[in-house]
Image (spheres, grey):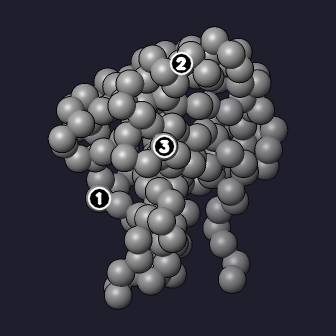
């Protein structure tokens, strides 16, 4: 199947827990990642530290997440590996093509993500209407900025 887009590489991994301080102890204090920002969203039920390893187009984001309310959805702490983010060179074309070819997306459509890039999510579970999904893994598609497309494309 000819595709009008290209997956360029891993943009991020997101790790959830009941208290992100414990996650920071490993990922920042022990492994040496740099905290580059913080994102809080009631809609997404998340308080996350945005960390990074590497530089430029080879930088990979590692998001350390805890829920604002452990009783609400989405439950960002329910699975330790919450999701994997993939750079894509043309997010709207990718979503259009994937949808037409049976990929199920999570509600919310394309929107701004925590790091400021346009994002959307492939649903972890398939449905009768959309038989292709993440097979238990939530996958975030992230619009790559021009410098990442140039470096990895």
Of residue 62 and residue 58, the one placed in the foreground of this image is 62
Disc 3 and disc 1 in contact, CB within 8 angstroms: no
Q: Nearer the viewer, mark 1 or mark 2?
A: 2
Question: In terms of secondary structure, where does tag 1 sit?
Answer: loop
- Residue carrying label 3: 80
- Residue carrying label 1: 107
Q: Residue at x 51, y 71 (%)?
A: 135
Distance of label 1 from label 2 (alpha carbons): 30 Å
**Above or below for 5 versus 83:** below
- Residue carrying label 2: 24
**Residue 57, percent across and down?**
75, 32
Q: Which corner quadrant holds the N terminus? A: bottom right
Res. 139 in view = yes
**Residue 137, percent across and down?**
50, 60
**Residue 103, percent across and down?**
47, 74
**Above or below for 8 versus 64:** below
Picture quarter containing residue 21? top left
């Amino acid at each position: 199947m000819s595709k009008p887009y290209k997956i360029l590489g891993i943009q991020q991994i997101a790790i959830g827990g009941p208290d992100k301080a414990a996650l920071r102890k490993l990922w920042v204090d022990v492994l040496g990642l740099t905290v580059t920002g913080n994102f809080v969203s009631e809609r997404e039920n998340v308080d996350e530290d945005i960390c990074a390893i590497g530089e430029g187009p080879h930088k990979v984001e590692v998001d350390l997440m805890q829920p604002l309310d452990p009783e609400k959805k989405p439950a960002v702490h329910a699975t330790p590996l919450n999701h994997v983010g993939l750079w894509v060179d043309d997010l709207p074309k990718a979503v259009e093509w994937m949808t037409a070819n049976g990929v199920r997306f999570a509600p919310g459509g394309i929107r701004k993500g925590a790091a400021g890039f346009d994002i959307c999510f492939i649903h972890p579970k398939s449905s009768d209407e959309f038989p292709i999904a993440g097979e238990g893994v939530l996958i975030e598609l992230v619009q790559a900025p021009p410098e990442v497309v140039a470096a990895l494309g």
